Image: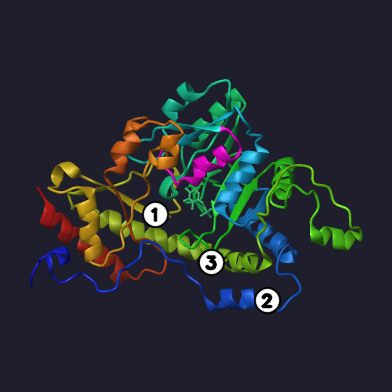
Amino acid sequence: MSNALAIDGGAPVRRDRLPYARHTVEEADIAAVAEVLRGDWLTTGPGVEGYERAFAERVGAAHAVAVNSGTAALHAAAHAAGLTTGDEAIVPALSFVATANCVLYMGARPVFADIEPDTGLIDVRLLESLVTPHTRAVLPVDYAGQPADLDAINALAHAHQFAVIEDAAHALGATFHGERVGNIATFTAFSTHPVKHIATGEGGMLATNDPALAQTARAFRNHGITSDARTRETRGGWEYDMEALGYNYRMPDILCALGRSQLSRLDTSLARRRAIAIAYTQAFADIPCIEPLIQREKRQSAWHLYVVRLRLDALRVDRAQIFRALRAEGIGVNVHYRPIYLHPYYQRLGYAPGLCPRAEALYARLLTLPLWPGMTDADVADVIEAIRKVCAAYAR
Ligand SMILES: *Cc1c(COP(=O)(O)O)cnc(C)c1O
């Protein structure tokens, strides 16, 4: 048997590329959507409330507001938190751009915080030094599915009177010290993009325990209008009031039905994600060129991503070469994320390279491996075999 790497012309571990993430849609989901399509309400109908109630109950929140993306959920939270021109909001450097973009949408300024090198989570020891009289919010990201140090963040937010907008796009179903993500921060934003835990095509949810903030977010998703079409239909009038500048971020009933059906299988899919993560971590214990991220005590990750750090000192090549070699083996690796402020738009706003050195150093070593509930044990074995093969070939 030849051990030549596929990138050098050898036989790949698998011919079809295993994606890093993939949705799961079952017949029950399709039936739920079809039922809405045969009914009277394609959007802003009874399916929205039903989905919101089921979601709020699952994440332990008093209120959940359905919107049409995770980004819209973050934007609605930034609006309800009152962010405005001249304000600052603290954002971890290592996240998807949406976490910082929602601050810019409000005319406020993202202040980037560096991360812990072993978890990729916002480093709470740095937070105090970033707080100014202009700080209006902090946006911790539950990177890869593991909750940030929400106790420390909540304490700081309480002391300085600012809002916590938790970006839980990776963390539906996660817990922190036994408490569910969704019932910890002022706001918790979720995404239902197909790579995330439940898939609605596009979609998001904003959870909060504060009824007034929920009301503000509800109006924000409908142009800032304080009543919706169905309420007016029931009430019988035609008048409505636009009280604030909002957007059309409404989640159609079609997608709410899909989300609700998907949500009913969340526990099964979380368990499968966790089992795959455990299998990886066990296998990688004796592969010297990679180190998985560390899981902190009393935090239960929702395992959106399985992220490893390459030990570049043990390798003859850089991350880009490992990435290409694994792709050639049929393993759909990915990278999450380039530090936000290194994107051209943020560079033009004046954020300089070197701002968050640990995020930049971690970024150079990051690799995301395939992890999704529909993966078979054979798929998992392929990933492990390819990692072993590529690491051995490039070991120093
Ligand atoms: C996916 C994601 C978002 C945005 O969600 P969309 O539904 O794609 O708008 C925001 N933050 C993080 C960390 C994400 O991974």
Image coords of residue 44 (percent x, y): 73, 62
The image shows residue 230 at horizontal and vertical percentages of 81, 62
Give the residue type at disc 3: Arg
SS for dot 1: loop
Residue 302 falls inside the magenta stretch = no
How far apart, in angstroms, are the residues tagged by discs 2 and 3?
A: 22 Å
How packed mark 2 is, by other alpha carbons closer than 10 Å (few <14, some 14-19, many 20 or more), is few
Can you say whether 164 is above or below 6 in the image?
above
Q: CA distance from mark 3 to mark 1?
A: 19 Å
Please identify the quadrant where the N terminus is shown: bottom left
- Image-quadrant location for residue 272: bottom left
Q: Which residue is mark 2?
A: 37
- Of the two numbered discs 2 and 3 on the same chain, state the one appearing first in sequence: 2
Mark with earlier residue (3, 1): 3
State the image coordinates of residue 36 (x, y, percent, origin top left): 68, 74
Give the magenta-colored segment's residue range.
Answer: 93-108
Q: Nearer the viewer, mark 3 or mark 1?
A: 1
Alpha-carbon distance for marks 1 and 2? 33 Å
Mark 1 surroundings: few (<14), some (14-19) or many (≥20) residues within 10 A: many
**Mark 3 falls on what kind of element?**
loop
User: Given the image, on which type of amino acid does mark 2 rest?
Assistant: Leu
Q: Nearer the viewer, mark 2 or mark 3?
A: 2
Name the residue rendered at 21%, 54% in the picture.
322
48 and 28: which one is in front? 48
Of residue 392 and residue 44, the one placed in the foreground of this image is 44
- Judge from the rendering whether residue 271 lies leftward or rightward of residue 387; answer left or right: right
Circles 3 and 1 in contact, beta carbons < 8 Å: no
Q: Which amino acid type corresponds to the residue marked 1 in the rendered image?
A: Leu
Q: Which residue is mark 1?
A: 305
